Image (tube, helix red, strand yellow):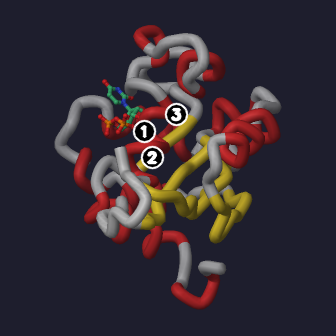
Amino acid sequence: MMSDGDTTAMSLETTLAIIKPDAVRAGNTGHIIQRITDAGFRLRGMRLMHLTRPQAEGFYAVHRERPFFGELVDFMCSGPVVVMALEKEDAVRAWRDLMGPTNSKDAPKGTIRGDFGTDVGENAVHGSDSPENATTEVAFFFATSELL
Ligand code: UDP
């Protein structure tokens, strides 16, 4: 616990969140944004877009050797997504906690994947998994001048 006068503070971070095509298609965009703001994240950037195949392949390049890569790219290009830059203390971990685990079937009720995801692939949302990747992923979608 931090006490009065404690100068140690968690760092203010910005993480990249994506509302994936399954959740946009199902009409859950508003519900998910409500949860994000209720949890105290500040929106620094937000855009509705339909990813091209090269964009989806580039964004998920770290997974290109994985067996699910083709399916993941097809899914991410299957309809509009909402990309967001979210700011909060410890934002990377806080957003991963709010999302829940990768497989929606293992995700507890009350997490976004638990409530809005379907399975391991169609899991409603993306979140950066480290502060380093968050920096790269935010820059993938937002120019510095677009971050408020
Ligand atoms: N994915 C999939 N099949 C798998 C594992 C992952 O389709 O067996 C998809 C899923 O949409 C996941 C994304 O690939 O969100 C990235 O996988 P990662 O392991 O990085 O999970 P995340 O960081 O999104 O929880």
Seen as rendered, the residue at the extreme front is 4
Label of residue 96 in the image: 1
Q: Residues within 10 Å of mark 1 (few under 14, many from 20)?
A: many
Q: In the image, residue 1 lies at what x, y percent? A: 35, 44
Mark 3 C-beta closer than 8 Å to ligand 1: no
Q: From the viewer's perspective, tell me whether residue 14 is left or right of residue 148.
A: left
Which one is in front in this view, the residue at disc 2 or the one at disc 1?
1
Q: From the viewer's perspective, tell me whether residue 126 is left or right of residue 7.
A: right
Pointers 3 and 1 in contact (C-beta within 8 Å)? yes
Q: Which residue is the site of mark 2? A: 127
Q: Which residue is the site of mark 3? A: 98
Mark 2 C-beta closer than 8 Å to ligand 1: yes
- Say above or below: 23 vs 131: above
- Residue 26, quarter of the rendered image: top right
Pointers 2 and 1 in contact (C-beta within 8 Å)? yes
Give SS at disc 1: helix
